[in-house]
Amino acid sequence: MNVQPTPVLAIDGLRVEYPLANGSVFTAVENASLVIRPGEIHALVGESGAGKTTIGNTVMGLLEKPGRIAAGSIHIDGKRFDAARGSAEGIVLGRDVGAVFQDPMTSLNPLFTIESQLTEAMRFHLGLGKAAARARALELLESVGIPEPRRRLKAYPHQLSGGQRQRVVIAAALSCNPKLVVADEPTTALDVSVQAQILKLLRDLADSRGIGILLVTHNMGVVAQIADRVTIMHRGKVVETGLTEEVLRRPKAAYAKALIGAVPRIDQRLDRFPVLGDEGKGRAEQARAELRAKADRTDVPSEDTPILSVENLCVDYTTGGWLPGSKGHRFRAVDDVSFSVRSGEVFGLVGESGCGKTTIANVVSGLVRPTSGRVLYHGRSIAGEGAIRRAGPVRQAIQMIFQDPYSSLNSRMRIGSILSEPILFYRLADTRAEAESDVERLIEAVGLDADAAQRFPHAFSGGQRQRLSIARALGARPRLIVCDEPTSSLDVSVQAQILNLLKDLRDATGLTLLLISHDLAVVRQMCDRVAVMRQGKLLEQADSEALFDAPQHAYTRELLSLVPTLDRIRGEIKAA
Amino acid sequence: MLNVLISRLGQAALVMLVVSAVSFVMFRYVGDPVATMSRENASVEEKAELRRSLGLDQPLVVQYGQFVSRTLRGDLGISYRNQRPVTELIAERLPATLELVIVATVLSLALGIPLGVLCALKPHGIAARLVQALSLVGISTPTFVTGIVLILVFAVSLGWLPSFGRGQVVDLGWWSTGFLTISGLKSLLLPGITLALYQLTLIMRLVRAEMIDVLSSDYIRFAKARGLPARYIHFRLALRNALMPVITVTGLQIGSLIAFAIVTETVFQWPGMGLLFIQAVSFVDIPVMAAYLLFVGLLFVLINTVVDILYAVVDPRLRARSA
Amino acid sequence: MKTLAPTPGLFVRLGAPVSVIVAGMVALFLVACALLASWIAPYDPTDLASFELINAELPPAFTADGDPSFLLGTDNQGRDLLSAMLYGARVSIAIGGGAVLLAATLGVTLGLLAGYFGGRVDALIMRIGDVILSFPTILMALLVSGIARALFPGAATAEWAPVILICAIAIHEWVQYARTVRAATMVETAKDYVRAAKVIGLPPRRIMLRHILPNVMSPVLVISTINLAAAVLTEATLSFLGVGMPPTYPSLGTLIRIGNEFVFSGIWWIALFPALALVILVLSVNIVGDWLRDRFNPKLRVKR
C-alpha cells in the first residue's frame, strides 16, 4: 500500500477577515482548502481581488494587520499554524518556507551585495560561518543557472539583469532547503523569453528537490505550463480545484469556464471573445450607428492610398551630457522601420519590451519627433522629413488610447468635461448643448450609461475607465486610433470585453486601428496584419493568419514557442 | 564616477563664480569707497587721485580680475569700521564659529538619529509621541528665543553656565580653541545646544520619515519573508538604507548652521564670524560683508562637493560602472 | 476643485485629531486678532503722541506694581505692550504671508515650466535654484537687506522695510515650491491623461493650467502652511538681528530685540510676551501643517 507523504501544505476551511473602521468586516478569503504534496506545483489563480495573494501572505505569516484568520486551519509539513503567533510550531519562515515575490528589482536591497543577501538567512537559520555560507551561495547560484557565479557574488543588484535578479531571489528562497516555496506572481514583471526560463527553473526545482510550490498567479498560460494542480478563486471563494488538465480542459463551474474562455487563444482566431457579464449592449448599437452617421459627413479618401505609411523611420534617444558639446550615450530605439496600414484594417505591432513599438506609436501620434525617415497620412508627411505642422483635421484624425486606465483620465475633472474637451476644441459641435448630447452618445457607444458624464473617474473600475478613454478618443472623430497596450493592465475577463468593444466600434464606424501589444494571443485575435519587432528593427510582417501559422523569421518562431498557452499543458501539445 | 566628480566640480566652480561676482559688485558699487575713505572736504583732484590709486578707473573686467587675484593672494581689503585687514579679522573669528558648528553638528547627529529611529520603530509609543510633540515645539521656536530662555534658566537663575563669551581659550598656532579648558567647554555648552536644537529636530524628522518609508519597502518585506530577526532588519538593513539621504541633508545643514551661528553668536556675544558679519551689516561695512560672503560661499561649496562625492562613494549604484 | 474653508467642520470631516483642531483654531484666532489689530488694540502704538516716556517699563497689570491701564505692561518707550504686540503680530503675519504668496507664485510657475518642458528650461531653472539653495535663508535675507540698506540709506528704509523683507525671504523660498511642483509636474506629465491631451492637440499653456495645475496644487498648499511658519520665523530673526522692522514700527521680533536688553535687569515682560505670542502662533501653524503633510502624503503615514 502506498504511504502518502505528509503534505507540504494543507489548508482546510480557511477564512481570513479584515475588520473595518466602521465596524463591519471584509472577508478576503472564505472557506478555502487545498493540499500540496512534496514535488508538486499548485497554482492559485484568480483575477484581482480574488483572495489568492491573501492566502499567500497568510501562509508566509506576513498577513498585514488588521487581517486575521477567523476560521479554518493551516498545516505546514504537518505542523499546525498558530494564528496568534503568526507561525507554525517548529516551522521557521525563511528556513522551511521560502518566498519569491513579483518584482525582482525591488525585492533585493540596492545597498548590499548579492553575497550578503544570499548568505544572511543561512547564517541566521543554519548557523553557518562566513566561508561555509559563501560556498553554499555559490552552489545555489549555479543551481539556478547564473553564469560566472563567483563574480556575481560580489555584485550589486542593479548590475544584474531582471531575469538574473529573479534567479537570485529564487536562490535566496531556497537557501535553507525549504519544504515549501510560496511564489507570488514570480514572472509577471519579466519578458516572455525570461519568463519561460524562470518557469522551467521552478519546475526543475520541484522535480529534483521535492519542494512543494504554491504558485500565485493571474496568468492561465503560466498555470498550464508548469502546474500540477490548480485552484481557481473568485471574490474570496474557491470556484474550482483539481488536476491542471482536468480544470483547463473540462472546467465545471461557470466562472471557471468564463475565465478560461476569455483567455485569448493563440492557436486560432475567433470572431469575438466569449465574455461573462454585461457588455452594456443596450443603447450601444444605436449610439454607434449615430457615430457612424456623423463620421460620414467628412471626406472619405480614396481606397488606394494606405491611410498610414511609415517609411525608413529612425528614432534615437540621447542621454547624459548636460554640458553643451559633450555627447551622451545614443540609443537607437527605432531602426529603419517601414510598413503601411490600410484604411479600415487592424494592424498589429508586436514585440517584447524595449523593441521600439511604443516609440513608433508615439511618433505616429505626434508625441515624439523622429530622427530620420517619415510618416505619411494619406500621402502627406506628418512626421519627419517635410512634415507639415499637425493641426486641425490632420491632428484630429489620429488619436490614441493608453495602457494604464488609472492615469489616463484626469482625476480632477468630470467625465463630461474630459470627453467634451476634444469636441469643443475642434468645434465639432455647434452649440454647448449639442456637445453635451455628443458626449452622451459617446458614452453609450462604449457601453456605459449616459449619466456617467456627471461623475468623476474614481467612481469607475479599470475596465470602465478604459471604455471612457476610448470614448474620449472617438470624440475627435478620428480615422485612425493608435492603441498602446490597451488591455495589458486589465483582468482577463475585462480584457475580453474591451477587445470586443474595439472590434464592434471598428465594424460600426470603419475606423483603422494600430494595435501595439506584447501579447501575441491578443494580436492574433484582433489583427488583420501583423509586424514583429525586436530591438528597434522590424523583422517580419504578414497577414495575421499567415504569420501565426507559418512564421518565417526565426525570432518569430521562437517567440511563438515561448508563449505559455492553454494549448500546451505541461509542455506537451495536445489535440484540442 | 569620474563623470560625477567632474560635474560636481563644474557646479562648484559655477557657484564660486557667481558668488565672487556678487561679492565684487558689492565691493565696488554699493557705497562709494572713495567718499568713505577720503576726508570730508577733499578736493576733486584728491578724490580723482585716490580713485586712480585704488584702480577704480580701470575697465570693469580688469577690476574684477584684480579683485580675484587680490583675493587669491589673501587680501580682502580693509574693514571700514575698525580699519584692520579683513583677512585678519576673519582668521581671528573663524575658530570660534567652527568650534561652535562642530559641537552643534555632533550633538544634533548623536541625538537626532537615535530619536528618529525610535519614532519610526515604535510610532505609537509614549516616548515617540512625546519626542514628536517636542520636535514640533523645536521647529517653532526661533533660535534666539531658545538662546534667551537657556540663558535665563541656566545662567541667570541657576548660575551654572556662563551667558556670554568663550571662556578661556588656548592658542594652537593661529587657531584658538575652547576645547581644552573647562571654562571653554562650559562656554560652548549653551550656545552649542541653542544652535543644535533646530538642526536636531530636522534630522530627527528626516530619519523618522526615511525609516518609515524604508520599512514599507519590498526589500524589507523580502527580508522578513526570509525570517531574518527584527533587530537585524531594523538596525543593520533598514537603517543603512534610511541614512543615505541624511548624509546629504547633514552636509547642507552644516552650511545652514554656519549661517544660523549668526543669531546664536548675537545672543551669546560669541566672538565668531557671524557676530562680525552682523556688525558689518549694521555699519554697512562693505569689505567685511563682501569677504564674509565670499568666504562662506567657498565653505558651502566645499562642503557640498565633499558630501556629493561621499554620497557617490557610499551608494553602490553610483559607484561602479555596470558590468 | 473642492474649496477648503477652514471651519471646524472641515477638519473633523478630514479626520483630524483633537490636537490639530485646537491648534487650527488657535492659529485662526491669533491671525484674526492680528488682522483686526487696529480695531481691538487699546492703544495705537504707531501714534507717537499716544505714549509718554513717563510710562516706560511698567510691569503687567496683574503684578504687584502694575498699572491696570496697561494689561501686559509697557516697553522702554512707554508703549502699551499688548497693543504693540497686536500690531507687531499683524506686521509679522503680513510679511510672512506676503513672502509665501510671492514665493508660491514664482515657484509654482517656474516649477510647472521646468517640469513640463524639461530639457534646457528645466536645467536652467534648477541650476539657479541649486545655487540659491546653497545659501541658507538667513544669509540670503541678510545680504538682500544689507545691500538694500546700503543703496537706500536712512529714512527710506523704514517704509521700504516690509517690501525688502518680503523679497528677501521669498528669494529663497521659491526654490522649494519650484522643486516640489516640478517633481509633481514631471509625474503628471508622464501620465496618460497628459499624453492624451497632447495627442488631442491642446496647446501647452492650456494643458499646464487646466490639467496639470489642479493636480499639483495639493503639495503646494501643504508646504505653504509650513513655509508660512518658517517665513514668520525668518522675519522675526531678521528683526531681532536689527535688520528687519525698525523700532518705530516693530514686529514681534523687534519687540523681543528691545526686550532682550532689559532681561538681565529684571524687566522680563517686554521680551517674554512677544516671544510667547510668536512661538504659539508658529507652533499652531506648524501643527496644522505637519498634520496636513502626513495626511496627504500616504508614504509618511504610519501603518496601524
Image (spheres, coloured by chain):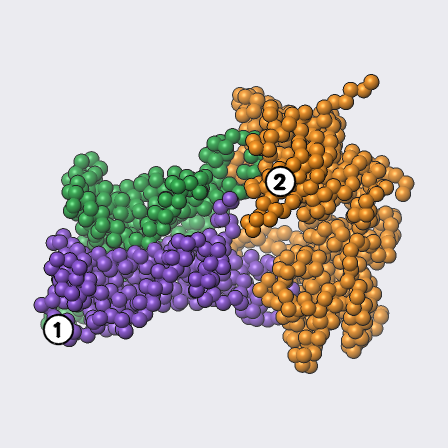
Q: Secondary structure at mark 1?
A: loop
Q: Colour of chain C?
A: purple
Q: Dot 2: within a 10 Å radius of its alpha carbon, few (fewer than 14), some, or many (20 or more) residues? A: many
Amino acid at the residue labelled 2? Pro
The answer to whether any part of residue A431 appears in the image is yes
Which residue is found at the position 69% from the left and 44% from the top? A236
The chain carrying label 1 is: B
| The C terminus of chain B sits in image quarter | top right
From the viewer's perspective, tell me whether residue A306 is left or right of residue C55.
Answer: right
Q: Which residue is mark 2?
A: A104
Frontmost residue, C91 versus C174: C91
Q: Quadrant of residue C237?
A: bottom left
- Give me the chain that's orange: A
Between A51 and B101, the one lying in front of the other is: A51
The image position of residue B94, as x and y in percent, is 24, 47
Q: Which of B98/C17 is in front?
A: C17
Q: Give me the chain letter of mark 2.
A: A
Q: Are marks 1 and 2 in contact (CB under 8 Å)?
A: no
- How many neighbours does mark 1 have within 10 angstroms: few (below 14), some (14-19), or many (20 or more)? few
Residue, x 52% and y 58% (percent of image)?
A: C184
- Name the spot of residue A428 as percent of width and height, x first: 70, 77
Q: Amino acid at mark 1?
A: Ser
Chain B representation colour: green
Check the image and report above or below for B141 versus B1.
below
Which residue is denoted by mark 1 in the rendering? B43
